[in-house]
Image: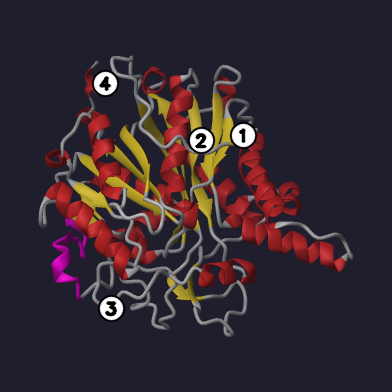
Amino acid sequence: MTTQTAERTADVRPGAARPTAVFTGIGVTAPNGLGTEAWWRATLAGESGIRPVSRFDATGYPARLAGEVPGFDAAEHIPSRLLPQTDHMTRLALTAAKEALEDSGADPAELPEYSAGVVTAASAGGFEFGQRELQALCAKGGQHVSAYQSYAWFYAVNTGQISIRHKLRGPSGVLVTEQAGGLDAVAQARRQLRKGSRLIVTGGVDGAICPWGWTAQLAGGRMSTVADPARAFLPFDTRAAGYVAGEGGAILVLEDAAAARERGARVYGHLAGYAATFDPAPGRGGEPGLGRCAGLALNEAGLTPADVDVVFADASGVPELDRQEAAALGALFGPRGVPVTAPKTMTGRLSAGGASLDLAAALLSLRDQVVPPTVNVTDPVEADGLDLVTQARRGPLRTALVLARGTGGFNAAAVVTAEDNSPAATA
């Protein structure tokens, strides 16, 4: 198993054969619902999972709210032999992966050996894993463990445990691009399908609701310190004051379309396009890369902005970043040119788990022909010119664009289409 970095451009060669990738399974652990259908019901109902931190004593910190996965008892979901070997984030990831594989109906044991693997995203989870290890070593008088070592251990444990538990002996890797990671991991999974794999478990579950992780996020200067859960995370609102951190995410099963059809799998949608860009280095000027990224993803999908029915926004909650995203959407779609939603207002930003959860929401929107709401945003910035969905809105929906930005200048965009909206569906 190797830790891999994301290839930052669309990966289709002109004129090359394009085997399609389809989503056949979804597993979710989110602050407003444990399990896909529980989370989706809460999301459509506008039920928020943001509340005071309970996983550690946050009373001495300026930010005291978080999105925590409710009602999660690891002993109910994880084999007892794995409990001593895993941390909270890995247990959540294992739970989501098991649900996703069961939802897909695929049995890895029936697939050719080495044809199924795992590619996930992670970033902040290393803080919690590292803090646990440091505390254990300090209690024993052990040697110092570096932050790099704690991250490396966490990434290896997270992806490795999914591989081991489900006997997925094919390609394995981890993408580390913060909030953009959930989309980058899915794109890397698609690359593995194009190389001959049949099925890849992908996505991300992440978070750092612990003192070490909390301190690091506060140092970034973008966390909201508002004490009211209904006012703390308000992207595209005149009262926006930063983001609320959360934990969780989604694990998805991405499958070769021909292999999925062969076994009669139910398909949520196609991964029709993907792209990634970097923002210019600080102080060098130039436009942020999100708008170009979205355009490249649509281009790879062979679609135009007019084909997009809904955008799942990155929605940072930081006023300047929100303005940049709104400007990018306005330039691509025109004023109020497409419905825009940010269901992460109900969960907080989940680091590497956030974009894969948005991807799951996009797929279920296509399935159920409904756009989930952006909650609590009651005073949108008029200059943004966004058609912001603040109550669940019915379709028709055929194509969704999912956007994500990671700290450090990462941008990622993915286009998902309904089953009968892909050229390959009728091939």
> Toward the viewer: 43 or 140?
140
Q: Nearer the viewer, mark 2 or mark 1?
A: 2
Answer left or right for 188 relative to 135.
Answer: left
Tell me the distance, in whole angstroms, between the alpha carbons under discs 4 and 1. Answer: 29 Å
Q: Which residue is mark 3?
A: 239
Q: Where residue 240 sits in the image (x, y, percent)?
A: 31, 74
Q: Where residue 113 sits in the image (x, y, percent)?
A: 60, 18
In the picture shown, does residue 340 fall above or below 190? below
Tell me the distance, in whole angstroms, between the alpha carbons under discs 4 and 2. Answer: 22 Å
The image quarter containing residue 110 is top right
Q: Which residue is mark 2?
A: 201
Q: Nearer the viewer, mark 3 or mark 1?
A: 3
Residue at the spot 57% in from the left edge and 27% down from the top edge: 171
Q: Which residue is mark 4?
A: 424
Tell me the distance, in whole angstroms, between the alpha carbons under discs 2 and 1. Answer: 10 Å
Give the number of the disc on residue 166. Answer: 1
Q: Are marks 4 and 1 in contact (CB under 8 Å)?
A: no
The image quarter containing residue 261 is top left
SS at circle 4: helix
Res. 180 in view: yes
Q: Going from the N terminus, do you reach mark 3 or mark 1 first? A: 1
Q: Amino acid at mark 2?
A: Val
Give the magenta-colored segment's residue range.
379-394
SS at circle 3: loop
